[in-house]
Amino acid sequence: MANPIVIAGGTVVDQLSERRVDLLLINGVIADSGEPGTFDGRGESVDASDAIVMPGLVDIQVHFRTPGGEESEDIYSGAAGAALGGVTACVMMPNTIPTIDNVEIVSDVLSLARTAVCDVRTSAAITVDRAGERLVDFAALHHAGVRVFTDDGWVVDEADLMEAALRETLGLPGAVISQHAEHSEMVAGGVINAGSVAERLGLPGRPREAEAVIVERDIALAAKTGGRYHVLHMSTSLATEQVRRAKHSGLRVTAEVTPQHLILTEDDVERLGAAGKMNPPLRLTEDVAALRTALLDGTIDAVATDHAPHHPDLKKMGLADAPPGMLGVETMASVVWDTFVNGGLMTRQHFVAVTSSQPARIASIGEHGQPLTPGNPANIAVFDPAKTWSIDGSSLQSKSMNTPWQGQRFTGQVRHTICRGQLVVHEGVLTN
Ligand SMILES: [Zn+2]
């Protein structure tokens, strides 16, 4: 059992309110909250002066590469980076080697995750080996703890399979079908957004409409079946309109966006090279504007990073040949805070909603993203809104260094992270 911890001097920001209170943590839960100074001497004091005390961030799309890709990342390096980024829970994607598509692999992965510094959950594939032919055993996987199902990396092309997946998960509490929405024939061979930069560089493109075609179809299937549907890493204005309409119709549809799609465009790809390559690709200025509007008006529910480490040797292969993906789990809090809260676009409570409480609800992670009130689990990030730092890929905790934010300065940084009542990051450093 952990020693009692007192989080002292900060401003608690959660879905209920903003308030100047100290928190007393005992045995993994918030035992009490009270006026500043109330709990002095009752436990290890953690300094939150001039800082925001919020529910730990929840990143519902990470690739920690276990099993099979451990040269780029593993559960432990991924979770350590997450903790440094104030993330107390994350959901791994199943595009591993082998694919996370059965109960045995899920149990193996979850037993490894037990000793990670933050709470690591896993999704499972929708189709066996993500081959798009046969559905997985949803009920068995749900029983093993899986709530998010996705063939991420690939799309589920077949409408019949998608409809059956939505139907089969209807009776499984908290289950959600998540889609990497890019029509595979439309993006075949494509490297970056189909647009002026791809033309200038002579690279095959991935058209924006490839996302809209899948999202439109899937929303129709969600309407037909009543199933729960989630759009992973949404990237275009077209899809924001579709999801907005679906929500207005009362469908059980949610969406997430990555920090990079909220800030960078195809024009940045020329500067970033392979570090600017991901699927779906960075898009247009008008897409960034539409994604921001959608995040601010509630059309997009969550920010998720699609944290996708690749060993430096792989990213050295150049824009055309390097694998797609960017790091994100350690930098999300700073990048989103600086851009949106410091930028005057978003309230602090809305920041908590899109980085913690709403993603936790999408992935049905009940122990995270909860109000910081007595009785709730102690999963907490203490965030210093005034601390400025410069991101350097080689200094990040990840085994890889493919950050799109190399050399950029951001204001706002995680100071401490408490996961399951344990102080896992103290003054910006992992405690063990
Ligand atoms: Zn994806």
Image (tube, grey):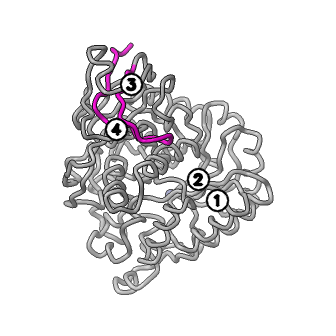
Give whichever of 17, 181 is nearer the camera.
17
The residues bearing labels 4 and 2 have C-alpha atoms spaced at a distance of: 40 Å
Of label 1 and label 3, which has the lower sequence position? 3
Task: Check the image and report above or below for 172 versus 328.
Answer: above
Q: Which mark is residue 151?
A: 2
- Tell me what residue is drawn at x 59 percent, y 51 percent: 150
Give the class, few, some or many, for how many residues have Cα within 10 Å of label 1's Cα (few <14, many ≥20): many
Give the class, few, some or many, for how many residues have Cα within 10 Å of label 3's Cα (few <14, many ≥20): some
Q: Are the residues tagged 2 and 1 within 8 Å (C-beta)?
A: yes
Task: Check the image and report above or below for 94 versus 246.
Answer: above
Residue identified by numbered label 4: 11
The residues bearing labels 4 and 1 have C-alpha atoms spaced at a distance of: 44 Å
Of label 4 and label 1, which has the lower sequence position? 4
Q: Which residues are magenta?
A: 1-25
Residue at disc 4, secondary structure: strand
Of label 2 and label 3, which has the lower sequence position? 3
Residue identified by numbered label 1: 156
Of label 4 and label 2, which has the lower sequence position? 4
In the rendered structure, does residue 14 fall within the stretch colored magenta? yes
Residue 283: where, in percent of width, then height?
A: 44, 74
Residue at disc 1, secondary structure: loop
The residues bearing labels 1 and 3 have C-alpha atoms spaced at a distance of: 50 Å
Q: Which mark is residue 34?
A: 3
Of label 2 and label 1, which has the lower sequence position? 2
Q: Are the residues tagged 4 and 1 within 8 Å (C-beta)?
A: no
Three-letter code, disc 2: Asp
The residues bearing labels 2 and 3 have C-alpha atoms spaced at a distance of: 46 Å
